[in-house]
């Protein structure tokens, strides 16, 4: 399994304002109830207060890289859960949002 | 009064079902200006999203759509077009009325139940991971806000339609936090509707009681996964997926659909029963306050079903899709 990023779940009344780049990661998407909100266009939905924020790297990263990512994100946000993202045999081992 | 509505003809048998149903709706006297929109296999084959943005936009504009069945890939491939529509339009309430149809043989007499299924959360958030090489995870998302709006919709429906009881269905004995939140929310909302009797059922017990003591149920409300399973069970009690209609409501938009799949092996064979999609169209007409047209279709359909001379294969006959629709039209004139 190749570690490539993390989904960080942030507790916020509004969509969190996050850095687009936290090297070596890029902010790939934000979803709410499994529906993509970022990047635009965002559907006109009623949101809950739990936002999935996906940071993904172009190449394999270390577990220490994920820890640094969490440290950076948590400077201005409250995260309640994080899930490491893996590739298995070149395929994403995680689901995509609607 | 003339209305605007979107028609999504769907995959497999969807186009021929829509053709039949639009003829019946047209013959009912309802004035509908239909706009075609695509979702499902056709846009996918062109490399577009399973529900193109322009389809979402046109439904947002017209606020009403009738949708034929669409094919959902199993295991891998694209996400479900049906679930995508519900999520992108925030159609949080799936409403599935179940009642006894004249002339449709079933052991379950005097059915009269309306199922409210939450449509946007639960395991259908489709948040899944391989956590290790051995372990796969799916997140079950239940929010108080999401539970509140579907439960309030069920109670409001009960109040507006003179229904006496609302039951919440859950598995809070095992999933004490997630289903517990759904149940707790239901209990809180029930207090605001003192004229409506409230009860709750664990989902496995509910299924058992549904097929043994169905007359005790009136309006039932449940999270997404249980609603998906129980509403198909109830559709079977009504006579099968070929006759069971469905509707999906959000704050602004409503999409009406048959609850069955696209039956691709029957595509182009003029065999599939259009009743489910037609009754979904009747629900749409009632939503549009086209009561006379809705009554006209329903009564004509009931006469055809009761007389039994035109029956599609699922109900033991040999009548084709289009001929069945013509038989209904003949009863309206």
Image (cartoon, coloured by chain):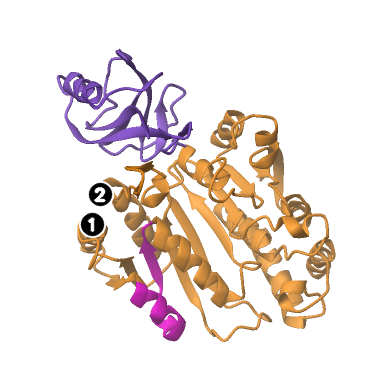
Chain colours: A purple, B orange
Q: Is residue B134 above or below residue B28?
A: above
Which segment is the magenta one? B204-223
Query: Going 47% across and 35% down the picture, which residue do you hit?
Result: A89
State the quadrant of the N terminus of chain A. Answer: top left
Residue B106's mark?
Answer: none
Q: Nearer the viewer, residue A71 or B111?
A: A71
Q: Percent from the top left, x then y, of residue B314?
A: 72, 73
Name the chain letter of the residue that bears numbered label 2.
Answer: B
- Within-10-Å neighbours for mark 2: few <14, some 14–19, many 20+: some
Q: Nearer the viewer, residue B253 or A18?
A: A18
Q: Secondary structure at mark 2?
A: helix
Majority secondary structure of magenta residues: helix
Q: Percent from the top left, x then y, of residue B80?
A: 54, 45
Residue B144's mark?
Answer: 2
Instruction: Assess whether residue B215 is covered by the magenta stretch.
Output: yes
Q: Percent from the top left, x then y, of residue B175?
A: 24, 61
Q: Secondary structure at mark 1?
A: helix
Residue receiving disc 1: B185
Label 1 with label 2: CB-CB less than 8 Å: yes
Can the viewer see residue B203? yes
Query: Going 66% across and 80% down the picture, which residue do you hit?
Result: B104
Looking at the image, residue B266 sits to the left or right of residue B251; the answer is right
Asked if marks 1 and 2 fall on the same chain, the answer is: yes
The quadrant holding residue B262 is bottom right
Q: Percent from the top left, x then y, of residue A36?
A: 42, 31
Can the viewer see residue B3? no
Q: Nearer the viewer, residue A34 or B53?
A: A34
Cα–Cα span, label 1 and label 2: 7 Å
First of labels 1, 2 by sequence position? 2
Instruction: Assess whether residue B305 is covered by the magenta stretch.
Output: no
Query: Going 34% across and 61% down the picture, which residue do you hit?
Result: B155
How many labels were placed on the picture? 2
């Amino acid at each position: 399994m190749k570690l490539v990023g993390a989904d960080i779940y942030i507790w916020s009344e509004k969509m969190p304002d996050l850095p687009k780049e936290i090297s070596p990661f890029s902010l790939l998407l934000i979803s709410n109830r499994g529906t993509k909100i970022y990047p635009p266009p965002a559907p006109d939905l009623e949101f809950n207060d739990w936002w999935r924020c996906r940071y993904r790297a172009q190449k394999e990263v270390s577990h220490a890289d994920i820890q640094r990512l969490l440290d950076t994100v948590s400077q201005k946000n409250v995260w309640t859960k994080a899930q490491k993202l893996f590739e298995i045999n070149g395929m994403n081992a995680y689901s995509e949002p609607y | 009064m003339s209305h605007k509505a979107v028609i999504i003809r769907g995959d497999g048998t969807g186009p021929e079902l829509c053709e039949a149903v639009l003829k019946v709706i047209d013959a009912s006297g309802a004035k509908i200006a239909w706009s075609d929109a695509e979702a499902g296999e056709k846009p996918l084959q062109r490399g577009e999203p399973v529900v193109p943005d322009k389809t979402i936009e046109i439904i947002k504009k017209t606020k009403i759509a009738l949708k034929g069945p669409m094919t959902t890939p199993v295991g891998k491939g694209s996400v479900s077009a049906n679930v995508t529509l519900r999520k992108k339009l925030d159609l949080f309430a799936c409403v599935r009325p179940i009642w006894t149809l004249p002339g449709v043989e079933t052991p379950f007499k005097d059915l009269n139940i309306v199922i409210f299924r939450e449509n946007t959360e639960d395991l259908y958030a489709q948040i899944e991971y391989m956590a290790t090489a051995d372990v796969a995870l799916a997140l079950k998302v239940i929010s108080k806000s999401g539970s509140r709006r579907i439960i309030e919709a069920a109670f409001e429906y009960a109040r507006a339609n003179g229904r006496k009881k609302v039951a919440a269905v859950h598995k809070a004995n095992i999933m004490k936090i997630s289903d517990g939140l759904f149940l707790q929310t239901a209990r809180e909302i029930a207090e605001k509707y003192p004229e409506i009797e409230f009860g709750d059922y664990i989902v496995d017990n509910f299924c058992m009681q549904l097929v043994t003591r169905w007359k005790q149920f009136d309006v039932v409300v449940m999270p997404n996964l249980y609603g998906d399973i129980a509403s198909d069970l109830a559709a079977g009690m009504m006579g099968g997926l070929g006759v069971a209609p469905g509707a999906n409501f959000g704050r602004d938009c409503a999409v009406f659909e048959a609850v069955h799949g696209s039956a691709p092996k029957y595509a182009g064979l003029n065999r599939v029963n259009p009743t489910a999609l037609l009754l979904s169209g009747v629900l749409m007409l009632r939503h549009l306050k086209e009561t006379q047209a809705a009554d006209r279709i329903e009564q004509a359909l009931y006469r055809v079903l009761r007389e039994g001379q035109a029956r599609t294969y699922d109900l033991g006959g040999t009548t084709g899709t289009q001929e069945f629709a013509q038989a209904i039209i003949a009863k309206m004139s």
